[in-house]
Image (cartoon, helix red, strand yellow):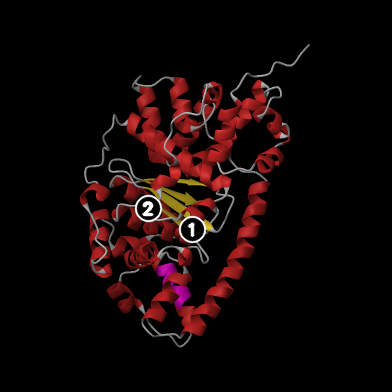
Amino acid sequence: MAIERMPITPAVLTWARERAGYELEELAVKRRDFKRIAEWEGDGPGPTYRQLELLAKDLWLPIAVFFFPEPPDMPPIEKTFRTLGSVQFGEIPPNVRLLLYKARAFKNGLCELNQGRNPAESHIVRELHLENYEQIELAATEIREFLGVSLGEQFGWRNEDTALKSWRSALFRVGVTVFKDAFGADEYCGFSLFDEEFPIIYVNNSNAKTRQIFTLFHELAHLLHRTSGVDRRSEFANRLATEHKLIEQRCNALANAVLVPYSALDKEIRSIEDPRAEAERLAKRFSVSREVIYRNFLDRGLIVQIEYESAVMDWAAAAEESAAENRKSRRQGGDYYRTKIRYLGEEYIELAFKRFHQDRIDEEELASYLAIKPKYLDKLEDTLLEGAS
């Protein structure tokens, strides 16, 4: 019995691959099923339906697109990130680049589920516009007041996980939806998609919780400056154009000031005879990383540059060991449904199920909004309800 081949349009497949940032050889070795992709893009027989399903999944496109007579007229995602140069955008690996498209799909989903209007009573991105000349401390105070999170509440969080969930919920209440995923590239901490109505923040779940918290506010700063952004460690920001480099520096400073208000830290510091021990204590107090506290120490002249750099290197090495253990743990498997809830967020999933139970969307649409197969929907909802009980 002959294997049925799908009559896809080769030019569309080439467009889809390049859109995702894959070289032909890269995609050919990504999966064993893709080893004949050069033939599919040329004059050879097309993929089987199963292979096409995998392609659509990996390239984050509907299967139907591959049968179009020519590539669709979709605006390239890089135009959204005007603070990045073409060289820097080109460095973004395919697995992260596809998350940019995934984020845009979720943004469109939010728009459709809410009939085009963000339900937040107070919308921080729409109502709070920050200017580059505005003082960092004043801007941080405005943000905290808008979020409605007091220092007393922050100090009361029992651990970093509680802090991350609480900040995420606070952002959702003011119109900013946070999604998470394992980026497969630990140096990429997160990104944001600016939109007047449905701004998105995407966070790398593989990073430490305190790093994820910092990323939330770095990206919020981008949104409040009315830009999309990509938060990457190392020298990435140093190679941006001067104007965009300054934006990145301001976003870092603003995130720092929101999480650790200047006046609050002054009151909380006890002794710096052992600055690393004090940083450890204060990091737990504010639910932030030791690096954030040490940066504050450096800015206040409480430590010297060489001590700051030495400590950051030591902590980075320890963090890499921890990340390696986490990667090993992830390879051993986990709870699929709880991971899905953690990545999409309880609020977004609850919204989608609410629209389903209101008969405003059908089961196939619900599965599409949640990026899950229909047969898994019942178990996902049960897991969600278990967490709420």
> Three-letter amino acid code at disc 1?
Lys
Image side of residue 62 versus residue 222, left or right: right
Neighbourhood count class around disc 1 (C-alpha, 10 Å): few under 14, some 14–19, many 20 upward: many
> Which is nearer the eye, 341 or 202?
202
As drawn, the label of residue 166 is: 2
Which of the two labelled residues, at mark 1 and mark 2, occupies the earlier sequence position? 2
Residue 162 location, quadrant: bottom left
Residue furthest right in the image: 1
Question: Helix or strand or loop: what does disc 1 sit on?
Answer: helix
Q: Where is mark 1, residue-wise?
A: 209
Where residue 59 sits in the image (x, y, percent)? 56, 35
> Which is nearer the eye, 152 or 42?
42
Please tell me which residue is depicted at 53% across the width and 51% down the height of the picture: 90
Q: Is residue 174 above or below residue 278?
A: above
Where residue 34 sits in the image (x, y, percent)? 69, 33
Question: Helix or strand or loop: what does disc 2 sit on?
Answer: helix
Would you say residue 306 is visible in this rendering?
Answer: yes
Q: Which residues are magenta?
A: 279-285
Q: Is residue 49 above or below residue 143?
A: above
